[in-house]
Image (cartoon, helix red, strand yellow):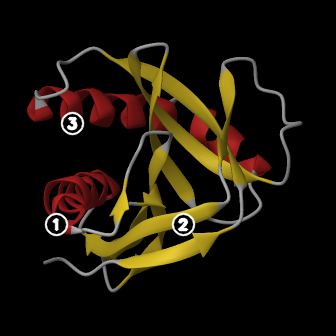
């Protein structure tokens, strides 16, 4: 099984720019293309830089969340409180509690997101017996770069079974 840890985290807020994913939830190629296109757009048009200026650390969040029966995807940053204003952005509250954490590295942020999501949902969650993911936002967190690789973690809120 892939390496993972269970960690207790305080609640935190991510301020994110979002898009609705239109691909069927089993169409991984379609979803990955939508996510990559979205990241390219927010990186090129300066919206990601605007978010980074509001952040309390250097982490970049890729958040998945179901909202009103829609698959939403956000590019975001951790903020101190919910006061930042950016018209199209959303405040995403992550609860205090236990999180399944999967660490990894990849050549690019897109690869990291896809790799960690695949490991967490495809390998770890199906095999872990003592906790369950019951919904809510989850995120891939790009934490930095070293030796030519992007590294980070996937954070998934879980509850005891």
Q: Mark 1 points at which residue?
A: 127
7 and 75: which one is in front? 7
Which residue position is annotated with label 3? 32
What residue appears at the point 64 percent right and 50 percent down from the top-left corner? Answer: 77
Q: Position of residue 138 (x, y in %)?
A: 45, 48
Does residue 156 appear in this view? no
Give the residue at x 75% y 18%. Answer: 87
Q: Can you tell which mark lies on residue 98?
A: 2
Viewer-closest of 86 and 91: 91
Q: Where is residue 75 in the image (x, y as percent from the top left)?
A: 51, 39
Front of the two marks 3 and 1: 1
> Quarter of the image holding residue 57?
bottom right
Tell me which corner region of the image, top left, top right, bottom left or bottom right, holds residue 45: top right
Instruction: Please say if 62 is above or below 102.
Output: above
**Residue 82 in the image: x percent, y percent?**
83, 39
Q: Distance between the residues labelled 2 and 3?
A: 27 Å
Task: Say what secondary structure mark 3 lies in.
Answer: helix
**Total tally of numbered discs in the picture:** 3
Tell me the CA gap for discs 1 and 2: 17 Å
Q: In which quarter of the image is the C terminus?
A: bottom left
Which label's residue is closer to the chain start, 2 or 3?
3
State the residue at coordinates (58%, 40%).
48
For label 1, the crowd category at 10 Å Cα-Cα, with few meaning under 14, some 14 to 19 and many 20 or more, is few
Q: In this view, does 68 lie above or below 32?
A: above
Determine the residue located farthest toward the bottom in the rendered image: 147
Disc nearer the start of the sequence (1/2): 2
Which mark lies nearer to you, 2 or 3? 2
Circle 2 crowding by C-alpha within 10 Å: few under 14, some 14–19, many from 20 = some
Residue occupying image coordinates x 13% and y 78%: 1
């Amino acid at each position: 099984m892939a390496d993972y840890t269970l960690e207790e985290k305080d609640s935190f807020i991510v301020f994110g720019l979002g898009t609705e994913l239109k691909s069927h939830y089993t169409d991984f190629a379609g979803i990955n293309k939508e996510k990559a296109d979205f990241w390219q757009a927010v990186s090129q048009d300066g919206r990601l830089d605007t978010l980074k200026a509001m952040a309390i650390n250097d982490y970049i969040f890729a958040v998945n969340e179901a909202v009103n029966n829609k698959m939403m995807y956000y590019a975001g940053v951790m903020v101190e409180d919910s006061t930042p204003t950016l018209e199209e952005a959303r405040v995403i509250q992550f609860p205090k509690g236990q999180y399944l954490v999967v660490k990894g590295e990849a050549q690019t942020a897109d690869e990291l997101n896809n790799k960690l999501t695949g490991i967490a949902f495809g390998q770890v969650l199906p095999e872990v017996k003592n906790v369950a993911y019951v919904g809510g936002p989850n995120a891939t967190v790009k934490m930095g770069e070293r030796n030519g690789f992007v590294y980070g973690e996937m954070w998934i809120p879980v509850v005891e079974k």
